[in-house]
Amino acid sequence: MAEITGLVLPFFGLILLGYIAARITKQPQEAMGWLNTFIIYVSLPALFFKLLSRTPIEQLARWDYVLTSMVVTYMVFALVFAAAVLIRHAAIGEATVQGLAGAYGNIGYMGPGIAILAFGEPAAVPVALIFCFENIMHFTIAPMMMALSGGDKRGAGALAADVVRKIAFHPFILATAVGVAAAWVEFTPPLPVGRLIDYLAQAAAPCALFAMGVTLALRPLKRVPGELGFIVPMKLIAHPVMMYLGLSLIGDFEPVWVYTAVLLASLPTATNVFVIAQQYSTWVERASATVLVTTVASVATVSTLLWAITSGTLPPDLFPG
């Protein structure tokens, strides 16, 4: 248990510190602007580049792993979307945000730090692959479904161009592409540049988690939506279980890769879901509540998962052979 506490406390402790600091200082939400800019455009891209550029190129071409992860995550989205329509009689736009809340985990802010601390630097490659391709999927699904709902009035050409732009110019995806290219040509940056990248990469997880705590404090929980009755268990329990079963069925993956995918699937709803809800003025307050509730509940579920992994209770392959 002490080992699990050592893994979990730094992460959820940083979120808690950010939350407390925001409640005490009462800074306006606009004050987060430059910190978010540093995290999204500088420190996390530096982390992705640093780790990927040092990875043998053959490890970056596991399409069976990428496709399994994407199929499982899309199944979670589809199940939550169906539940929202059939149980809550939600419109397409609201059901889309709920589907994203159940499938879109905080793999950008929380994923790299917690996976690397738990499993070491070998976790960097699966983190980067899952992040890039799942974000491509989410960036595509959201505008497409909102267009079907009538919430996005742009033409097909403008919609497609916006999706391509978001994918091609996302700083994490750009950093991943540059990191893969550096691994391909076996490029090593000059020592001063390498040290700068190291400093920036080391700041990524602490800044991202602190910022997440501040964000949660600035969006207080006003009421608990009824939809959380199926969204929370789907995000925190069903998603990692389905990921584990899917990877075990396909098989032949390194244990670190399996555990990393399952850990990322277990993470709480991404704050980007709230951003998407705001963008389309759909399910906004309840999206904010979902981020907060899943983050608080994930303290228990992620801790339990890490205990199961580190204690050997959860084998890396359910169907070996």
Image (cartoon, rainbow, N blue to C red):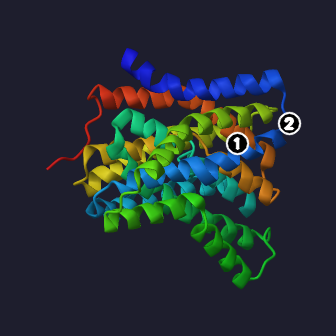
Q: Considering the numbered disc 1 on the image, is that residue within a helix, a strand or a loop?
A: helix
The residues tagged by marks 1 and 2 sit, at their Cα atoms, a distance apart of 13 Å
Residue under numbered circle 2:
28
Q: Position of residue 259 (x, y in %)?
A: 34, 42
Residue 146 sits in quarter: bottom right
Residue under numbered circle 1:
35
Q: What residue lies at 67% left-to-right and 51% top-to-bottom?
A: 273
Q: Position of residue 95 (x, y in %)?
A: 69, 56
Asked if residue 90 lies left or right of residue 48, the reply is right
Q: Amino acid at mark 2?
A: Pro
Q: Position of residue 313 (x, y in %)?
A: 28, 29
Asked if residue 20 lies left or right of residue 166, the reply is right
Residue 218 sits in quarter: top right
Q: What residue lies at 34% left-to-right and 29% top-to-bottom?
A: 308
Q: Considering the numbered disc 2 on the image, is that residue within a helix, a strand or a loop?
A: loop
The numbered mark, 1 or 2, whose residue comes first in the sequence reads 2
